[in-house]
Amino acid sequence: MDGLGSADVRELPRDDASDLDFLRFRQHDVLSRDQALAHFTDAAIRHRVASGRRQRPRRGVYVLQAAPGDDEQRRWIAVLAGPPGTVTAGRTALTQLGLRGFAVPAIHLLMPSAARDRDTPHDVLVHRTRLLDPADVHDLGSPPCTMPARSVVDAAQWARSDDEARAIVAATVQQRLVGAAEVRAVLARMSSVRRRPVIVQAVNDAAGGAGSLPEAQFLALCRRGGLPRPKLRVSRRDTDGRQRYLDALFEGYGVHAEIDGAQHLDVRGYWADMRRQNALWVSGERVLRFPAWAVRNKPDEVLETVRSALRAAGWPG
């Protein structure tokens, strides 16, 4: 098989494979023009593109197969079509690094502010920066991308709303892609960050245990209402000896708040939560349950309910 042959099945090249085989494997069969010319003549490249055996999706970028590409190829095409220093960033980089639940169709790219992009397609969003510390770039990414901490800061400042920004921060910390200290270090290096106060508070909430947007919103509600700060995701053993996590516990008052999200549409998940709640009631502790919708849309009612429960438990506020 010649170097421009088909690669329908991706297999790790053997130890004695050529440099081209390893390059194709790493870059999912996507090459820049300079890379292609290092292995083939210009005539050979033009012939295979003209015959339809290979693709040229963007100027100066070639895909060494005829079949439509996958998401990895789309990302490589976008990066190789950009000027030197281009990397995937924001939610694209986070998805690439393993974040679940926040994939977007568009590809977010970060490139030097002085660089000029070429014929950017509609599904590629270009962001520019004057500061991209080498420590913020994952050169071994496939393709190169920003590191998790820089990625979450960019994803949050490019989000469509403050709530979306909070959700991204909470998810990345909860899924252990990044630690709060790493995000704070990136924020300290960046002089201009949109939504800085929102991101800082979201990082603090995530460091305190908020693993979802509803939990972060509940914490913000408690701060606004002057309530004691609850401890989040408290570990308890149920009557069967299994480890369970409580959303929020007001220590010293025996008041728990459970925030019901979409998972409570599942009957088995809902029953597990009810069993946990019943065990707490049996032990004499107070359990309050709120749908995430109420925390978001009826905050005053939620706040008053929690305040009343705390006062009944002896809180002097």
Image (cartoon, helix red, strand yellow):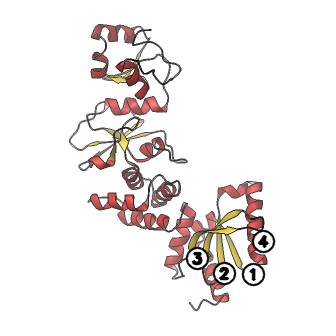
Label 2 CA crowd tier, 10 Å (few <14, some 14–19, many 20+): some
Label pair 1/2, CB-CB below 8 angstroms: yes
How many residues crowd around disc 1 within 10 Å: few (fewer than 14), some, or many (20 or more)? few
> Is 118 rendered above or below residue 162?
above
- Residue tagged 1: 284
Dot label at residue 278: 4
Does the residue at mark 4 contact the one at mark 2 (Cβ under 8 Å)?
no
Nearer the observer: mark 1 or 3; the answer is 1
| Disc 2: which residue | 254
Question: Residue 232: image x %, image y %?
Answer: 57, 70
The secondary structure type at the circle numbered 2 is loop
Percent x, y of residue 307: 61, 83
Look at the picture and state if 68 lies above or below 152. above
Q: Residue furthest bottom?
A: 316
Residue 312 against residue 20 in the figure, above or below? below
Direction from residue 224 to residue 308 in the image, left or right? right
The residue at 39%/23% (across/down) is: 22
Neighbor class of circle 4 (other Cα within 10 Å; few <14, some 14-19, many 20+) is some
Q: Compare marks 4 and 2 and give the one earlier in the sequence.
A: 2
The Cα–Cα distance between marks 3 and 4, rounded to whole angstroms, is 26 Å
Residue 300's disc is 3
Query: Callout 4, which amino acid?
Result: Asn
Residue at x-position 35% and y-position 23%: 31
